[in-house]
Image: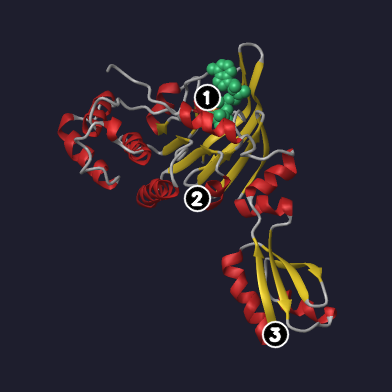
Amino acid sequence: MSAIEVRGLVKVYDHKVRALDGVSLDVEEGTVHALLGPNGAGKTTLIRVITTQLRPNEGSARVFGYDVVKNSSKVRELIGYVPQEVSLWSDLSGYENILIYSKIYGIPRELRSRKIEELLDFMELSEASRRLVRTYSGGMIRRLEIAIALMRSPKLLILDEPTIGLDPGARSLVWDKISEFRRENGVTVFFATHYMDEADKYADYVTLLNQGRVVAHGTPNDLKKHVKGNKVLVFFKESVDNSRLSEIVSGIPGVSISNLGNDHVELVVDDIPTKLPKILEEVFVKGYSVSEVEVREASLDEVFIKLTGRRITEESGRIKEVVSMRKMIRRGG
Ligand SMILES: Nc1ncnc2c1ncn2[C@@H]1O[C@H](COP(=O)(O)OP(=O)(O)OP(=O)(O)O)[C@@H](O)[C@H]1O
Ligand SMILES: [Mg+2]
């Protein structure tokens, strides 16, 4: 079954901004699926439709078979959602925040404190739980929001820019926690990002979105085939008979020759960490002496440029704007 099935979605703001222009996609149950695109691509709009906050003008979206418009309350029960904006009360402690949400979500009184403690512990927030959220780092805020989203044991976790503006250490801790929860609970994860390395590293499938349209989708490795994939260049100490070089790759699936020189061979490789040792072993067994090996990993950004002519992170000023837009929704206080 599809966790998410989107067909021909159109969303127009103010009768003029076509934020979604006929989007279709499927998210398979149990997978991690990234929605990758530059600022303004329509990522948040798509997530808002799927999470039942916005009605589309055309098309449909289903979550585990339930229509987001006709069965919106059922859809909301199945989803844990972490929005792009901060969704906490900054003048309350972490514990108070999660307690309020546990009441909103109707977690039975007798289960509440155990559930809260478990989640805070899991997210490594127990010690900080009595401190005001306004003293938290960006990473702690994100982990608390994710803890809250996981409280009702959702079948589908949707995260809008889960690590925007975080430093690399904080980003990888957020992802470690998401991955660990997923291993233990088998939840489907759908997340929006404009960090291509994150989509590449953590997603099983990636959908590239640009100006409200799906540009391409597939596994990160499939997408990289648009730019002829990752490359490994092997340079030899002396010139080698070209016709013999094809022997190197003949027995290795997922490796092909893209260019041959007198003293080097350029290989296209689907999966560098597993194939590089095999390539080198083959080179060694065939008796070639290697002077240098160069690895050129293709990035999803290159794929995006090839398909759209623009970079995902082209407008760095805009990203700063989005980071600063990740301001608190101050509730009460
Ligand atoms: N409430 C709104 N009213 C009018 N236009 C909007 C509204 N929300 C978004 N837009 C416009 O719709 C388009 C898509 O915006 P959206 O926020 O979905 O993109 P995004 O991919 O999430 O971008 P970002 O990376 O900046 O979060 C943009 O042109 C944006 O300016
Ligand atoms: Mg957005």
Foreground disc of the pair 3, 1: 3
The type of residue carrying mark 3 is Ser
Q: Which residue bears the numbered disc 2?
A: 202
Quadrant in which residue 242 is drawn? bottom right
Indicate which disc residue 289 carries.
Answer: 3
Q: Earlier in the sequence, mark 1 or mark 2?
A: 1
Foreground disc of the pair 1, 2: 2
Give neighbour class at mark 2: few <14, some 14-19, many 20+ (Cα, 10 Å). Answer: some
Mark 3: secondary structure = loop
Query: Is residue 56 something one can see in this rendering?
Result: no
Some atom of ligand 1 lies within 8 Å of the CB belonging to the residue at label 2 = no
Q: What residue is shown at x 21% (from left), y 34% (from top)? A: 131
Mark 2: secondary structure = helix
In the image, taking residue 115 as reference, residue 310 lies left or right, namely right
Q: Which residue bears the numbered disc 1?
A: 49
In the image, taking residue 99 as reference, residue 18 lies left or right, namely right
Q: Residue 64 location in percent, x, y?
A: 48, 35
